[in-house]
Amino acid sequence: MKKMTEKALLEAFAGESMAHMKYLIFSEIAEKEGMPNIARLFKAIAYAEQVHATNHARNLGLIKKTPDNLQTGIDGETYEVEEMYPVFNNTAKFQNEKGAEQSTHYALEAEKIHMKMYADAKNSAEKGKDIDIKEIYICPVCGFTHIGKPPEYCPVCGAHNSKFKKF
């Protein structure tokens, strides 16, 4: 692929990905505000943005077999844990931005868990086996991720496990 086209598709992929997430967040807000049809509209258009992002990713060669996709996940989480979030968190501390400091800390702690989960899953996928997971719980406050019954309180932010989302 020629460099200008690749750059354009990478930018389009990033934009569509961001729009997808933003619209899902907006959908949750509309739902909480008692506007289920607006929430549904946001979810539908978020899905359309995901379709666009997937098409761009396919053309960029980003979509591969599961072990390779897991390695991409491991690489991304490792970068976030070892480089990105420590720097972002230190910047927030330096500039006394408490909200940014908290959100980057929460993300860093969750990404550490994700990195290990992806590595374990990759080991299974390379053997042609799926992983044995009955349930996964996510803390909606900080993103703490737990396989199986979660602890009573989130070890990162202290939220009660009754708030966790089950997958």
Image: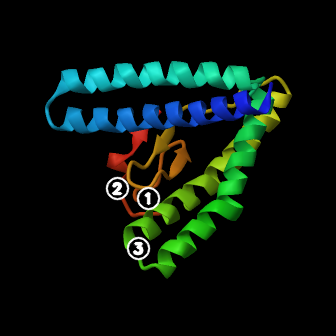
Q: Which residue: 75% across, 47% down?
A: 75
- Given residues 32 and 120, the one toward you in this image is 32
Which label sits in the foreground, 1 or 3?
Answer: 3
Q: Which residue bears the numbered disc 1?
A: 154
Q: Label 1 to label 2, Cα distance in Å?
A: 6 Å
| Numbered disc 3: secondary structure | loop
Callout 1: SS:
loop
Location of residue 153 in the rendering, given as x and y in whole percent from the top left corner: 40, 59
Q: Residue at x 72, y 32 (%)?
A: 4
The crowd level at tag 3 (other Cα within 10 Å; few <14, some 14-19, many 20+) is few
Q: Are marks 1 and 2 in contact (CB under 8 Å)?
A: yes
Report which quarter residue 73 is drawn in: top right
Answer whether residue 155 is visible to the viewer in this image. no
Q: Which residue is mark 2?
A: 160
On the question of residue 102 being in view, the answer is yes
Task: Decide: is 91 above or below 11.
Answer: below
Question: In the image, what residue type sits under mark 3?
Answer: Glu
Cα separation, mark 2 vs mark 3, equals: 26 Å
Disc 3: which residue: 97
